[in-house]
Structures are given as structure tokens and as C-alpha cells.
Amino acid sequence: MSSLRLHDCPGDDAADEESIGNDWLEDRGRSRRRERERMAARVVDDEFEEALERTRSPDPAAAVTALARYERELEAALERDDGGESYRAVFWTYYEPVVESIDAVAREDGWPFLLEVAEAYDHREDGTLSDATAVVANVVARSVIRARLTEGVDAIPVAALTYLGSIPTFDDGSFEIAWEESQHVGWAIGHPEYSLEETVLEAVEDDDIWAGAATFRALHTDQEAAAPLYAEVIRRADDVGFVLDRLAHLEGIPNWSVFPRGWDVDAEFDRHFTLSLEESTENQLREAITEIGYDERLPEDWTLEDLELRW
């Protein structure tokens, strides 16, 4: 074990030590990922692997079959008596491939296909989320953002937004990834037929972290509309520290969580997404922070970076 300690590694300055530490963490991450993939391959049946192979070219029937088999494999993995190891291995090994298979068809066939998939996995009809919800929510979120960036917010179907916006109501704490993917509904702020404000302010009563996360995404697309909403979330949130922590990481290159998992949005749009706060936006946020007295915990000349939670 001593060989893993940084002070035993070569290098005689802090930069070398940091580099070595990062390399070791990356190696460990790759090793654990390979181990997880091997476990997943042992757990799933051949029919699922074959179903995934058939999605290499966009095909609606193949993609939907892969999604259904993915859900079935997760249900079977959860029944194994191994503390959830098999479930996690299957979930993470095949999550992005299944997402990509549905997304590839959605990009060709558009909203009719995707909304049909969402209807088939509608938690509002089933009364509960499923192991497939995260996949569907990821692809719906990608399509919401694509529509926003290429056609405008009016082009987003209301059905897609009500699907995403209703997920947290049905989450019992067991579907964290679906809960996270649903936060991308924030990209729809300003929609003429869907009120993100209403969704967020209803959520803040029971789930202020979700409300803050959804509004955080809204700040990346329409600061003028999102700033007063975020300020109101700050005023109403019980767990305001987590809501404010996001603001410490707001400017510059967006955090990966602003976009659905596994989506290389920069490559797809051939641009680098960055954000700079407008003065009026920051002023509204600072006023809300001062109004609730949170500034008393901060340095006298505090900036948004000082809002980062430190453990």
C-alpha cells in the first residue's frame, strides 16, 4: 500500500505531486471502469448484447428493443444478492450506448418517435419511475436543448416538458440519474405554453436542490428570465447552501451537469459553450442573498465564488 502514497512517488515539487496524483486517480478510474464492464458482461444475457449490436445503424425497432431489454437486465441485476454491484455495473456500462441508440433515431425521426417512447415509459401512467426513465429523460433533454438552440423555445413540444418536469414528483430517492436528467427542463424557460416558473416554485417546497438545479440551467439560456426566478428560489429554499453553491461555478465553461450525460454538445454544435453573467443578473442574485441574511457568513467583499460549500 505504501507505493500508492503520493509522498513516496518521484517528483520534488507540488506540481509534480499533483500531476502524479491526478494520473493515479485516472488510472484507478479506468481500472474500476474495466472491472465494472467485465462484471456487466458476465451478468447480461447474449440477447441484450445482440440487441445493442443491431442499433449501430439508426433503427426505431432496434433502439426500442434495446431499451426494453436494458430495463429487463437492470431489473434482473437488482435481484442479485450482491449489494447492488451488478445493478450499478449494468446501469453504467450500458447507459450511454442505449441513450445513443434512442438519440440517433430521435435525430432522424424527430419528436413523433421520441414522444411515443416517452409515452410508453410514462411514469404518470405507471405511478412510478422505471429503470428506463433515465435513458428516456436524457434523450428528451437533448432534444429540448437542440430545439432551443436551433429553432427557438417555441419549437419544443409541451409534452416533452411536462414529461421532464413531472419526474421529481415520482422519485422516491431510488432514481437519482432520472432526477438529474429531468433538471434540463430548465432550458425551456420562456416557453409560451409551459411555465417553468410554476414547476420550479412548486418543487422548491419539497425539493429545493432540484429547483435550484433546473433554474441553474435556465441561467445558461436566458439570464433575463432566469435571474428573478433564481432569486426567488434563493428566498424560498430551506437548503439554500446547495442552491447557492451552484452560483460559485456559474461563469466560464459550463459544468458538465448543465447538459445531459454523455452528450458532446460542443462537438455537435461545433462551438464552445461559455457563460458570462450580466451585471443585472448578478445584482438580482446578490440582493436575494443579502435579503435572507446569508451574506453575514461571507467576507465583507464577497464574490459569487465565496458561495462554494466547503466541507
Image: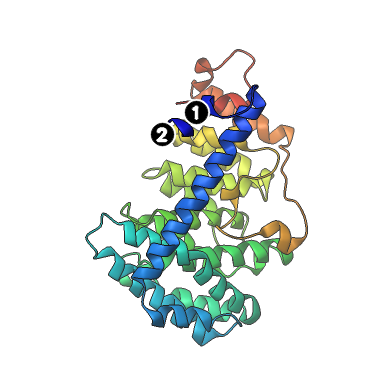
Residue 179 seen from this side: yes
Position of residue 27 relative to residue 9, above or below, is below
Nearer to the camera, 41 or 171: 41
**Which kind of residue does numbered mark 2 sit on?**
Met
Write the residue at 47% across / 58% down.
34
The residue tagged 1 is: 309
The numbered mark at residue 1 is 2
Front tag of 2 and 1 = 2
Nearer to the camera, 300 or 3: 3
Q: Secondary structure at mark 1?
A: loop
Position of residue 308 relative to residue 47, above or below, is above
Query: In the rendered picture of this protein, how many numbered marks are placed on residues?
Result: 2
Q: Residue 2's x, y, as percent?
A: 44, 30
Q: Of callouts 2 and 1, which one flags the residue occurring earlier in the amino acid sequence?
A: 2
**Tag 2 and tag 1, C-beta contact below 8 Å:** no
Q: With 252 as the anchor, is 217 left or right in this view? A: left
Q: Residue 121's x, y, as percent?
A: 40, 73
Nearer to the camera, 159 or 42: 42
Residue 120 seen from this side: no
Nearer to the camera, 16 or 301: 16
Neighbor class of circle 2 (other Cα within 10 Å; few <14, some 14-19, many 20+) is: few
Q: Residue furthest left?
A: 81
Q: CA distance from mark 2 to mark 1?
A: 32 Å
**Which kind of residue does numbered mark 1 sit on?**
Leu
Image quadrant assignment for residue 21 = top right
Q: Residue 66's x, y, as percent?
A: 45, 78
Q: Residue 13's x, y, as percent?
A: 65, 22
Position of residue 122 relative to residue 51, above or below, is above
Q: Residue furthest right?
A: 270
Q: With 47 as the anchor, is 257 left or right in this view? A: right
Q: With 292 as the anchor, is 40 left or right in this view? A: left
